[in-house]
Amino acid sequence: MSAPMSDINVDHLSAVRHVILVMSGKGGVGKSTVATQIALGLRHAGKKVGLLDVDLCGPSIPRMFNVHQQDIHQCSEGWLPVFVDKEQKLALMSIGFLVENEQDAIIWRGPKKTAMIKQFLKDVVWRDLDYLIIDTPPGTTDEHISAIENLKAYNPDGAILVTTPQAVSVGDVKREITFCRKTHIPVIGLIENMSGFVCPNCTECTNVFSKGGGQALAKEYHVPFLGCIPLDPELSKSCDEGKDFVEHYEGSPTLQAIQKVVDRLVKIDRDLP
Amino acid sequence: QIGVLDVDICGPSLPKIFGVEGEQVHQSGSGWSPVYVDDNLSLMSVGFLLSKADEAVIWRGPKKNGMIKQFLRDVDWGEIDYLLIDTPPGTSDEHLSIAQYLKESDVDGAIVITTPQEVALLDVRKEITFCRKVDLPIIGVVENMSSFVCPKCKVSTQIFPASTGGGQKMAEDMNVPFLGSLPLDPRIGKCCDEGKSFLTEVPDSPATQAYKQIMSKIVEYCTKRNENRESDSGEMKTN
């Protein structure tokens, strides 16, 4: 993974209108899934979107679009992202593309991770993007500190925080809110993911991971609440298969909840006529 | 006698799950005393060292490693049968440090947890690769959140479908033991939130049975390993 041979020192991030981080203090809450669905939703809304995966140890994004077999190509300006569609409206970058064998682990300590993230932010040729969505690993450590340090000059729009409803998750996400406040990253809002499951057989709704914790957290910390996203096995399957959930499951309450988040982000684009 | 060490420095959930959030760690001549959840169960976590519940631990790798080293060196566990170490997701500083610092301690092994979907298995295969690279034996794989039984109609659904065969197939493919599957029972999350023991509160849940089966496999593995260790040292003595 050597540095690209840039003839020109181009500031690629300056071509991006909105930078949004997807974060959580807790693992397994569905950050990558939410980041993916937001990216797909924004693309369906006609926006040009980039999705940057800075989860170096667990890079799930390429698989979620079924492009995990693809390679990264370099050009004189830097690294070219992988386009998911032939219209080139949705571009991805992930360390997943740079690893030959899917079983290979990235066993790096902080400094090496920090350097890779800096490279991702500086050297990827995004061209004009309406939105750059950045999927992060759980926590408040090297990857997050590095991402924010390198993004500060570009005035990111902020962070979307994802939690599941239960207190154990909310407890960690509180720390993520503290992190955002300390690093002066605005919190665009909080999503309560995996919020309820409707039995496909009898339509009884069960709160598998409790209910309401995310909403209460948003209220307690005065951050906007972006909504509850219920569990849908089809979403999990779509991510596994790299299928566009947004395109195939219009009637799903999960999709409707995601659409509300997308609509909120579209509103951020103040340059719209 | 069980000691539990929480090395998830950024997301220390165990104090809450064990119902001992807000407790204090005491220092004495013999080191840091862990917090006792029960007479035979103690816990150490960075969570006990935070001044506020929402305090963020915004540390880079080296500082996290320093904390982990201190935990391993300075906590006075007393005589314990098992030390369980809960790690954060990933294959980074915390994992490398634990593997490195414990190299001389003959770690019994790692239990690797996954959920059924391919997106999770993708990361867990890497974790298994990590274990192999650092010579950490793998006790086995546990598949969590396997299936959900509707409390009303009792029909079982896979909320996270095992589109590529789930934890069991992955374990087979990677040639590691499969310890079992844990179904999704909403009462597990509830007990964790309330700091109660699910196994005690809901003894008749299929999840409790599944947990017990997995635990007995782990105990069996550790007992066997102990016996092998003793017989090896016995052979060395006679030689």
Image (spheres, rainbow, N blue to C red):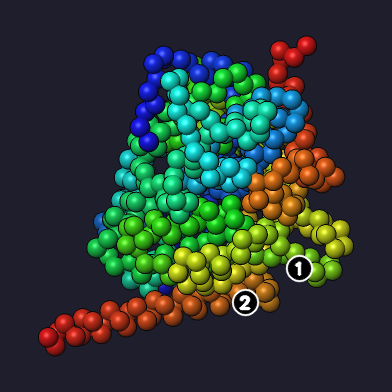
For disc 2, the chain is B
In this view, B56 is above or below A231: above
User: Does label 1 lie on the same chain as label 2?
Assistant: yes
Identity, as a three-letter code, of the amino acid under mark 1: Ser
The residue to which callout 2 is attached is B209
Tell me the quarter of the picture where residue B188 sits.
bottom right
- Residue B156 is tagged as 1
Does the CB distance between marks 2 and 1 fall below 8 Å?
A: no
For disc 1, the chain is B
Tell me the quarter of the picture where residue B130 sits.
bottom left
Name the spot of residue A184 as percent of width and height, x first: 53, 23
Tell me the quarter of the picture where residue B185 sits.
bottom right
Helix, strand or loop status at disc 2: helix
Of mark 2 and mark 1, the one earlier in the sequence is: 1
Alpha-carbon distance for marks 2 and 1?
17 Å
Give B147 or A228, whichever is nearer the viewer.
B147
Q: Residues within 10 Å of mark 1 (few under 14, many from 20)?
A: some
In this view, A187 is above or below B207: above
Residue A119 visible here:
yes
Q: Residues within 10 Å of mark 2 (few under 14, many from 20)?
A: some
- Residue A29 is tagged as none
- Give the residue at x 43% y 60%: B128
Residue furthest to the right: A202
Residue furthest to the bottom: B238
- Give the residue at x 12% y 86%: B239
Identity, as a three-letter code, of the amino acid under mark 2: Gln
Mark 2 or mark 1, whichever is nearer to me: 1
